[in-house]
Image: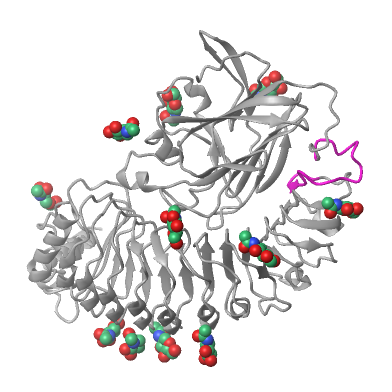
Amino acid sequence: MLQWRLLRLSLITMCFLCPLTSAHLDRQELVALAKIVRTMGATLNSSVDPCESKTLVISDSKPGLDQNKVVCNCHPNPSTCHITILVLRMYSLPGTLPPQLVDLPYLEELDLTRNYLEGTLPKEWATMKFLRSISLAANRITGEIPREWGSFTNLTSLSLEANRLSGNIPAELGNLVNLTVLILSSNKFVGNLPEKLAAMKNLTDFRISGNNFSGSIPQFIGNWTRLKRLELYATGLEGPIPNGIFHLEALNDLRITDMNGANFFPEYLPHKDYMKNLVLRNVNMSGSIPPIIWEMKKLSVLDVSLNRLKGNFPSIPHVPEFTFLGGNMLSGTVPDSILDEDKYIDLSYNNVTWPCQKNTVNINFYGCSSQTASSGIHQCPSKPNCKNKYHSFHINCGGENVTITDNSGKFSYDGDDYVGSASTNYVSGSNWGYSSTGVYMDNDKKAPMFTISNSSKLSMDCSELYMTARRAPTSLIYYGFCLENGEYTVRLHFAEIEITDNEAYRSLGQRIFDIYIQGKLEWKDFNIMEEANGTGKPVTKQINVAVTDNMLEIRLYWAGKGTTSIPKKGTYGPLISAISACHSMLSISDPFL
Ligand SMILES: *[C@@H]1O[C@H](CO)[C@@H](O)[C@H](O)[C@H]1NC(C)=O
Ligand SMILES: *[C@@H]1O[C@H](CO)[C@@H](O)[C@H](O)[C@H]1NC(C)=O
Ligand SMILES: *[C@@H]1O[C@H](CO)[C@@H](O)[C@H](O)[C@H]1NC(C)=O
Ligand SMILES: *[C@@H]1O[C@H](CO)[C@@H](O)[C@H](O)[C@H]1NC(C)=O
Ligand SMILES: *[C@@H]1O[C@H](CO)[C@@H](O)[C@H](O)[C@H]1NC(C)=O
Ligand SMILES: *[C@@H]1O[C@H](CO)[C@@H](O)[C@H](O)[C@H]1NC(C)=O
Ligand SMILES: *[C@@H]1O[C@H](CO)[C@@H](O)[C@H](O)[C@H]1NC(C)=O
Ligand SMILES: *[C@@H]1O[C@H](CO)[C@@H](O)[C@H](O)[C@H]1NC(C)=O
Ligand SMILES: *[C@@H]1O[C@H](CO)[C@@H](O)[C@H](O)[C@H]1NC(C)=O
Ligand SMILES: *[C@@H]1O[C@H](CO)[C@@H](O)[C@H](O)[C@H]1NC(C)=O
Ligand SMILES: *[C@@H]1O[C@H](CO)[C@@H](O)[C@H](O)[C@H]1NC(C)=O
């Protein structure tokens, strides 16, 4: 024991005696680093060597976040190391992007995800010969992608997701033939995708969702033979989807949503054995679902909802775990094989019939017809068999029963705490229900949170109603049934409680969805934070509508816009706190007026 201690002591002493064995960042790089950190809005403590500590010691550094990393190359001379990797994520750094980065000439990887950086992309960076990976996702960067970036010789991965970049994509970017990952989603890019991008044949991952591009999806994407993931949610581009895309042999994750144009499934798909996600939602697809889809053994998410697909169900050898077929014109009897308890199946808004005696926990038939209407009443509220007629309904979405009292009276809001699943049609004990569909694609699909609670104090009136909310990845429909016909006043109460602003980068989240009442689009690109002027603040939308068939339907739909990963992955889709609907004959005044 004593010997061991002595040995350890001498080892420590040795290290003090031989400073050459500890890493020292090159003097010039250290000076440059201090400037870089200052430009980004923090202060570097230069007395701690970043190569030695493997992190940057900076002012207002938030402890506990494992998002600060420095990697140095100390060969051959440990006294003059060079920074090769710099990671500073989730620091809400408030400054600008540092042009001085060029003074770290050996830098290979830069990751500044989830800060609060503004300014434009420095054109100087393109001269950095070793820089191969840049992530600036979730910042406030403005301006265009500089043409000069077309000469970024070693760049292989670029993510500019969730910023405020605008303008056209420069044709010069097509010179980056070695680029494998290009992510431009959630910005304000416009214009056509330039033909010169055709040369980027090394791309394996291409995402440009949530922009305002114009023109058709370029044919050349169908020539990017290495492509594995293609994500085009609400790009602004139009169909048709080039046939080449369906034939890309490496593709296993194809997502296109919310797009105009005439689209069809091709006869043949080569991905039978490895396609994992196939999302073609709200893209005006007609024709039928090709039988080969049901042979894709690895297919986990199939979402072809909100199209004009027709046809009966053939025999189905493999049912993907998440199968969303809602909002089409499918007909015929649903085969038993699809009614599997472990699968999440959405067949809402079709014209299908099904065996009612089946346990249908995660199967959503809302709005479908049924063979046995008498027992299927709750699964089929569009033709309810009502004993009583109601004049109102009140829902505290995602929460418990609450009673709101104020000087105009008492109001009871029904609890809505049945958590639900990726495909749910829930019917309450009174006269309302909800239909919820969708899966947070890039999160743990097994542990979604469809009901959420506030994580900080709320100070609005009737805060009980806003302390919980229901959310859904794609579609959330609340409906009232057995209502007396007539004119109703509908009030929808919202407060953004998932995106908070306790750290600056969090407030960059943009939840955007559409609201349909009785099938009519009433509020497009609705953004709670924008309307309420901040997070944790209430906003109420009110509308008068006619009920003519005893049903009132409020549909919230994520049409692919906004951010999806601020503050964390899977923060998007509709969210609502409370709903009330009252017949105009009821002269009840609501506490929210
Ligand atoms: C810099 O870090 C050293 C070592 O941790 C510490 O002693 C010193 O107080 C720090 N300086 C400032 C200005 O924070
Ligand atoms: C690209 O990086 C590699 C090392 O990763 C280096 O050998 C090469 O010289 C760089 N290319 C250019 C054009 O500088
Ligand atoms: C692409 O990468 C190869 C090998 O890494 C390199 O030789 C070539 O210069 C790169 N081309 C461009 C245009 O960056
Ligand atoms: C890019 O593709 C070319 C062939 O098209 C290939 O020679 C080169 O190595 C690829 N570069 C990378 C980084 O994979
Ligand atoms: C998108 O671009 C079109 C022109 O191509 C323009 O009319 C429209 O207003 C833009 N939309 C947004 C949300 O900026
Ligand atoms: C796709 O590649 C083929 C063969 O390399 C070429 O003939 C064709 O012109 C390319 N199409 C587009 C749209 O780039
Ligand atoms: C939908 O596709 C049909 C052809 O199948 C086409 O006539 C129609 O214009 C398309 N609608 C939109 C909005 O693109
Ligand atoms: C729904 O399907 C039934 C047969 O299953 C058919 O008689 C009926 O016409 C269909 N309705 C619509 C609107 O397509
Ligand atoms: C809410 O009240 C109803 C009766 O009005 C009751 O059936 C239900 O269990 C209550 N829900 C909760 C969450 O307390
Ligand atoms: C939610 O808001 C209520 C009302 O302001 C508050 O009492 C409660 O502490 C908040 N919950 C959390 C976790 O902050
Ligand atoms: C929005 O909130 C900010 C402070 O967070 C305030 O300065 C501004 O006046 C508010 N705008 C409106 C329209 O209420």
Image quadrant holding the N terminus, namely bottom left
334, above or below 511, in the image: below
97, above or below 133, in the image: above
400, above or below 202, in the image: above
State left or right for residue 229 relative to residue 297. Answer: left
**Residue 80: quadrant of the picture:** bottom left
The spot of residue 540 in percent (x, y) is 50, 29
Q: How is the image coloured?
A: one colour
**Residue 19: quadrant of the picture:** bottom left
The spot of residue 172 in percent (x, y) is 33, 79
- Majority secondary structure of magenta residues: loop
The spot of residue 317 in percent (x, y) is 80, 67
Residue lying farthest top? Answer: 407
533, above or below 138, in the image: above
Indicate whether residue 377 is drawn in magenta.
yes
Depth check, front residue: 448 or 82 = 448
Depth check, front residue: 376 or 81 = 376
User: Quadrant holding ligand 2?
Assistant: bottom left
The spot of residue 422 in percent (x, y) is 65, 49
Q: What residue span does the magenta drawing correspond to?
A: 360-379
Q: Which residue is drawn at the image coordinates 65% and 68% (left, top)?
A: 262
Indicate whether residue 467 is drawn in magenta.
no
